[in-house]
Image (cartoon, rainbow, N blue to C red):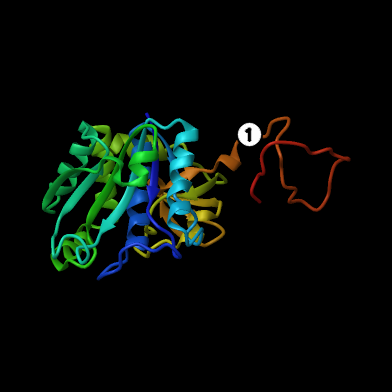
Amino acid sequence: MKIAVRGGHTERCTGSVGIIKELTEDRLVKDAVIKYLKQLGHTVLDVTPPVNYTSNEGTDLAYGVNKANSWGANMFVSIHFNNAYKTYNGAIGTEVCVYNKFSEAQRVVDGIASLGFKNRGQKVQGNGLYELRETTMKSMIIEVCFVEATKDVELYKRLGADTIGKKIAESIANKKVTSSNTTAASTSLKVGDRVKITGSKYATGQTISDWAKKQVHTIQQIKGDRALLKEITSWCYLKDLQISTSSKKLEVGMYVQMVGSKSVSYTHLRAHETLAN
C-alpha cells in the first residue's frame, strides 16, 4: 500500500500548545509511523511541510494534500494533537477524524486507546476539514491526545512517541512489528553506506534534532544493533536508519556532485539526480 503521512502545522502556522507542543510532538510520532510502516512492507511518502514553510493555513494544508494526491497514495494519514480549551472543555483521550468511517481508522483509534488513552472513537467530519475534503483517497486525521490535559500528557510522555507511532503503524497494517521485520530492515546496512535517520532518539537516549535527520550520514562502524555515524560521531540503532536514495548506484543520466580534487578526464555531467557529498 502507498501511504502518505504528514505531521501537522508549521512554526508560523502553529498548532496546539499546552504542557507539550503539538508541532514538536506530531513530528516525532510521524517519524515513528513512517519507520514502522516501512518495516511492515508499505511504501511511504512523508508529505510534512518544512517546519518554517508558511504562515498561511491553507497553503500549509495544501502542501501535504497535493503531494499525496499527485503521488497516487492509497491512504493519507495526518498526525495531530488536540486542544480542549476551545472545543471540548477539558476533555481527554484520543480520536480519529474521517470523511466517512472506515476499518483502518477504527483500528487506529482502538490501538491508541489500548495504550491507556480514553477512546473517543471516529469523528465523521464530512466537508468540514480540508485534509479530509481535498484528498482523493482514504484519509484520517489522528488526534493522539490533548496537549494541556495532565492525564493525557503524563501517559504520552511515559509511553513515548516511538511506542505510539508503532501502534498506529501496526493498526493501519493490521499486523505486528516483529524482530524479523526490524532485522530485515537493518541487516543489509554495512560500513560505508550513506543513510538517513528515521528515528527520534539516538542509541544513547538523546533526542535527534531535525537538522540531523535532514542530512545524509556515513556509517563508520557497526556494533550489534547500532551504527556509528561519521559526520556527527553519534550512535544510532540500525532499525532507525535507511539507505539514502542519493546512495544508489550511479547510472548514465544522473546529476552528480563532484567531491574529489582531481578528474581523470573531462567529464560531461548531465542529468537527473544529485548525490549528496
x, y percent for residue 39: 35, 37
In this image, 188 relative to 162: left or right? right
Q: What residue lies at 30% left-to-right and 68% top-to-bottom?
A: 17
Q: Secondary structure at mark 1?
A: loop
Seen in the picture, residue 194 relative to 28 is either above or below; the reply is above
Out of 202 and 12, give the one closest to the viewer: 12
Is 16 in front, or is 213? 16
Q: Which residue is mark 1?
A: 249
For the view shown, which residue lies furthest in the bottom direction? 19
What is the three-letter code of the residue carrying label 1? Lys
Above or below, comparing residue 272 to residue 18 in the picture: above
At x 46%, y 60%, the residue is 210
Q: Residues within 10 Å of mark 1 (few under 14, many from 20)?
A: few
Q: Among all residues in the image, which is located at the extreme front?
A: 127
Res 255 quadrant in image: top right
Task: Pick the quarter of the image with the N terminus.
Answer: top left
Q: Position of residue 131 (x, y in %)?
A: 36, 44
Of residue 171 and residue 142, the one placed in the foreground of this image is: 142
Q: Residue furthest right?
A: 266
Above or below residue 130? Residue 13 is: below
Q: How far across and down, in percent of the image, does residue 263 sit?
A: 84, 45
Evaluate whether residue 177 shows in this view. no
How many discs appear?
A: 1
The picture places residue 92, in percent across and down from the top left corner, at: 14, 59
Quadrant in the rendering for residue 81: bottom left
Does 190 sit above or below residue 260? above
Q: Residue at x 37, y 32 (%)?
A: 42
Nearest the camera: 86 or 119? Answer: 86
- Residue 76 seen anywhere in this rendered image of the structure: yes
